[in-house]
Amino acid sequence: MKINIAIDGPSAAGKSTVADYLAGKLGYIHLDTGAMYRAVAWAALKKGLKLDDAESLLKLVKRMRLDMMKDGRILLDGHNITPDLRNNEVSMAASAVSKIAALRSAMVERQKEIAKDGGYILDGRDIGTVVLPNAELKIYLVADSEKRAQRRYKQDLSSGLKSDYNLILKDIIKRDYDDSHRAASPLTKADDAIEIDTTDMSFEEVGEKILALALNKIARGEEND
Ligand code: DC
């Protein structure tokens, strides 16, 4: 039996890394829903659109072909844009475009369709609450903002990117605020999600903890089949 796993939480809490870890261990597919909002933001910046212009952004979404590949690559109209999506400018723009309710509906519909047969790990902000309210396992990851900024800073340096710790921290705090205070599907913990504070945990520890929970759900699902 293949379950779906929802992982939500604020930016840079380690959702993607942990989702990749679980996908490897379980043979499941990781869908990074934040990358979908990043791809729209990247295309909007490239076209010089205003990030609060709902009408133009929706037109853009309707016209663009976004392929979320099983290996994690993101293709926009056939071009691999994956390496362009992680910088601060795109992060802030993704947070801005993700406020638009109609744009969110289009993304949510795609995400539900992709995960409909199970065997997926989706990470984002609204997975347990809106995208997969019936997911068999829901996780809500949190960590201190300083710790999240440190992790992102180290990640940038090890990927050979130029980085600025203070700027990352400032952006994380702003995105936390914006993502949790927007009107459309704000970041909130689902009532039935298990919260894990990863501040003092390694990614492997977090991954192993969620893996144990997932294996338990899968085993119980098989017993009931
Ligand atoms: O997870 P991330 O940092 O890559 O997400 C980028 C932005 O997209 C984030 O600021 C909020 C938004 N987002 C969202 O609103 N809903 C999701 N399911 C995923 C991301």
Image (tube, grey):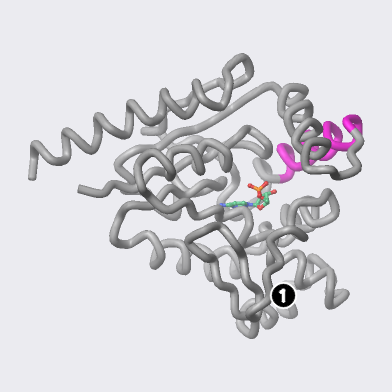
Image quarter hosting the C terminus: top left
**With respect to residue 21, does 56 lie above or below?**
below
**Residue positioned 41% across, 23% down in the render:** 209
Q: What percent of the width, then of the height, locates residue 76?
A: 66, 74
Q: Is residue 115 left or right of residue 39?
A: left
Magenta span of residues? 165-178
User: Would you say the magenta stretch is mainly helix, strand or loop?
Assistant: helix
Q: What percent of the width, then of the height, locates residue 198?
A: 58, 22
Residue where numbered disc 1 is placed: 57
Q: Quadrant of residue 98?
A: bottom right
**Residue positioned 41% across, 33% down in the render:** 193
Q: Quadrant of residue 85?
A: bottom right
- In the rendered picture of this protein, how many numbered marks are placed on residues? 1
Few, some or many residues within 10 Å of mark 1 (<14, 14–19, 20+)? many
Q: Is residue 167 magenta?
A: yes
Q: Secondary structure at mark 1?
A: helix
**Residue positioned 56% across, 51% down in the render:** 185
Query: At label 1, which amino acid type do we have?
Result: Leu
Q: What percent of the width, then of the height, locates residue 162?
A: 91, 42
Q: Is residue 3 left or right of residue 11?
A: left
Q: In front: 80, or 99?
A: 80
**Residue positioned 62% across, 53% down in the render:** 34
**With respect to residue 34, does 192 lie above or below?**
above
Q: Quadrant of residue 16?
A: top right
